[in-house]
Image (spheres, rainbow, N blue to C red):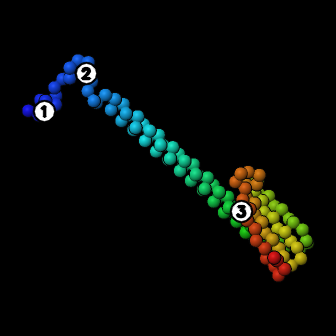
Amino acid sequence: CFFEESMRRLPEGEIGNRSGIVLVGLIAAIMICAILGIAIITLSTSSAYINTTFNSFNQARYLADSARRYQLSFPLTTTGTYTFTTADGDRFEIDVAAGCTTYRGIANPGTSFEALRQWSEGASCP
């Protein structure tokens, strides 16, 4: 019977051609798991960085819009740059020049996530 032949015992001291196959398989499985783990960590870290950067640029845009709304509510007519800082350290600036007003929003100033958005309005703006 085939089953009986495959179950026969090898003579003592004879290992056969199966030596180490389990160890090789185990090492391969550990390597695959390690590679997958590193890939997941890398993807999650880069996703968090992209999300933080995106949020910084959105915050800078909102700050520049706040500068424009401030200028509409409380018109600044004297030439110069006016800087306003929020409670969390972000700021917006209004740069008034002859015929051109520039609005700037700066989010996370002084950090690696610093973001700047600006636009200008007026007849003599570049």
Q: Which mark is residue 3?
A: 1
Is 83 in front, or is 11? 11
Q: Earlier in the sequence, mark 1 or mark 3?
A: 1
Q: Earlier in the sequence, mark 1 or mark 2?
A: 1
Residue marked by disc 3: 60
Q: Are marks 1 and 2 in contact (CB under 8 Å)?
A: no
Could you tell me residue 9's position as x and y percent? 18, 23
Could you tell me residue 64's position as x and y percent? 74, 67
Mark 2 residue element: loop
Q: Which three-letter amino acid code belongs to the residue tagged 1?
A: Phe
Q: Earlier in the sequence, mark 2 or mark 3?
A: 2
Numbered-mark total: 3
| Whether residue 92 is situated above or below residue 108 in the rendered picture | below
| Whether residue 65 is situated above or below residue 16 in the rendered picture | below
Graded by Cα atoms within 10 Å as few (under 14), some (14 to 19) or many (20 or more), the crowding at tag 1 reads: few
Q: Residue at x 88, y 73 (%)?
A: 97
Q: Which three-letter amino acid code belongs to the residue tagged 3?
A: Ala
Answer whether residue 119 is visible to the viewer in this image.
Answer: yes
